[in-house]
Image (cartoon, helix red, strand yellow):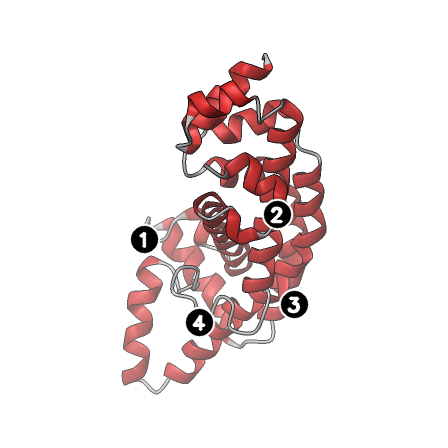
Amino acid sequence: MQRREFTAAAAAILGLGVAPLARAGLLSQADASMGVKTALERGALAAVGLLGQDGGFMKNPKVHIPLPGMLADAAKIAKFTGQQAKVDALVAAMNRAAELAVPEAKEMLVAAARGITVQDAVKIVRGGDTSVTDYFAGKTRQPLTTKFLPIVTKATEQVSLADKYNAVAGKASGLGLVKKEDANLQSYVTRKALDGLYLIIGEEERKIRQDPVGTGSDILRKVFGG
C-alpha cells in the first residue's frame, strides 16, 4: 500500500480530516504503524492494571462474572435454604480467580502489541469498534487460555461449591439448560476473564482515539489527533 493511500484510509476511519493530512504528508506507514502499536500497548497495560487488582472484576459491572444461565436462577433459591453464603463465596472466588490470572497476560499482550506488522495496523485502522479486540484475541486468546486455566483452577478449587457446580452444570448441559462451554467452572471463568480483558482493552483504545492529546504522547497525537 502506498503512503498516501494508507494515510487517507487511516484518516477516514479515524474521523480525521483526510485532505489536510494527505496534503501535509504527516503520516507515513512507519508513523501509523508506531501509533497503532503504542495505542495497543497502552490499552493492554491499562486494562491489565485495572482488572488485575482486588475488585477488578468483582466490582466492575462491565466484566463481573456471574453464575451462568440456569445456575444463576437456581442460586436465587439458595437464600431460602441457608446456602446463600456458599453461593456468594463461589461467585467471589470466580471473580478473584480472574483478577489473579489477568496480570499473567501482561507480557504476552505487550509482545503482541510490539510485534504488530504494517498489515495488522492497516486492519486495525480500517476496522470497527472490535478491531483491537479481534487483533489481541487472534494473537493471544489460545495461549492465554492455557496460561490462565491453572491459575483459575487453583483459586476456585478451595471453594466447596466448585466441584458441585461442575457436577450440576455437567448434567444441565446434557439437558440443554447450560451451554457446553459453561459446563466446567474453570473453563467458564477463564473464558469470561479473557472476554473482560479484551473488552477493557477495546475501551482503553477508544479513549486514546477520542483524546490523543490527553495521552501526552507525540506519536499518538500525530496519528490519532485531528
Rendered image: mark on residue 147? none
- In the image, which is nearer the foreground, mark 4 or mark 2? 2
Left or right of 186? Residue 114 is right
User: Element at badge 4?
Assistant: loop
Rendered image: mark on residue 154? 3
Q: Which residue is mark 2?
A: 217
Q: Amino acid at mark 4?
A: Lys
Q: Dot 2 surroundings within 10 Å: few (below 14), some, or many (20 or more)?
A: few
Chain-order first, disc 3 or disc 2? 3
Question: What residue occupies the far top of the structure in this picture?
Answer: 2
Q: Amino acid at mark 2?
A: Ser
3D distance between C-alphas at marks 1 and 4: 28 Å
3D distance between C-alphas at marks 3 and 2: 40 Å
Residue 171 position, x and y percent, is 40, 56
Q: Amino acid at mark 1?
A: Leu
Depth check, front residue: 130 or 28: 28
Q: Which residue is mark 1?
A: 177
Q: Quadrant of residue 187?
A: bottom right
- Cβ atoms at labels 1 and 4 below 8 Å apart: no
3D distance between C-alphas at marks 4 and 3: 21 Å
Q: Which residue is mark 4?
A: 59
3D distance between C-alphas at marks 3 and 1: 27 Å
